[in-house]
Amino acid sequence: MPITIPVDGVLGSMIDAFPTLFSEQTSGKPSRVRRLALTFLVYLLGDSSIPCQRCLPEDIAAIIHHINQRPGNPWRNPDMAKLTSLSTESFIRRFKRWTGETPIRYVQQVRVREACRLLTATDTSIDEIALQSGFPDRFYFSRVFKRHTSHSPAAYRRATRSLDTTIDS
């Protein structure tokens, strides 16, 4: 079944970049195509307004939307359960049944994704990124980030910056 995806400014600019990128005759073309394709995919998968996510029950889809919109909020299982009018235990079971993850693990993944974006796109300090992403401090943030990405936040930033330099050359 086809999926209709609304094209916003960010998505439109990525779509516009593909033809130019494919017509390039440079040695870095494969890595640039891969990076743009992955960025495109991550953007689409993170957009809770895409119709393919409507197959989730309304209450779970609403929680996921709120988490994706505000990853830095203090998301706690009892608070999320109240939003769905379920007991905490029932909410956790239902969330895991539909997403394959516990709510807290999902929140961590969204926070790490947001931190990756901030580490790549800004010069904000790692301490500030930790707070903006919803982690209480840099040390806990670093442990969780490394568990999800296999890299420390500083190493991730260096690697993405060196990749940008290589691609731009």
Image (spheres, rainbow, N blue to C red):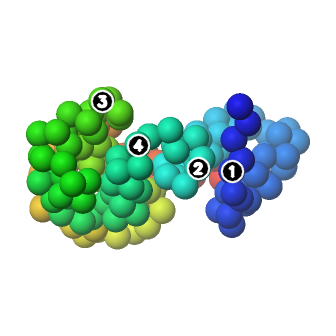
Q: Which residue is mark 4?
A: 57
Tell me the residue at 20%/34% (across/down).
93
**Residue 135 visible within the image:** no
Mark 3 belongs to which amino acid? Answer: Arg
Determine the residue located farthest toward the right in the rendered image.
Answer: 23
Which residue is under mark 3? Answer: 97
Which is in the foreground here, disc 4 or disc 3?
4
Marks 1/4 in contact by CB < 8 Å: the verdict is no
Q: Amino acid at mark 4?
A: Pro
Distance, label 1 to label 4, CA atoms, is 20 Å
**As drawn, is 14 to the left or to the right of 105?**
right
Mark drawn on residue 5? 1
The residue lying toward the viewer, choosing from 70 and 99, is 99
Residue 41, quarter of the rendered image: top right
Q: Crowdedness of circle 4 by 10 Å Cα count: few (<14), some, many (20+)?
A: few
The disc labelled 1 sits on which kind of residue?
Ile
Comparing marks 1 and 4, which lies closer to the viewer? 4
Q: Are marks 4 and 2 in contact (CB under 8 Å)?
A: no
Report the mark closest to the observer, 1 or 3: 3
Q: From the viewer's perspective, is residue 147 above or below residue 141?
A: above
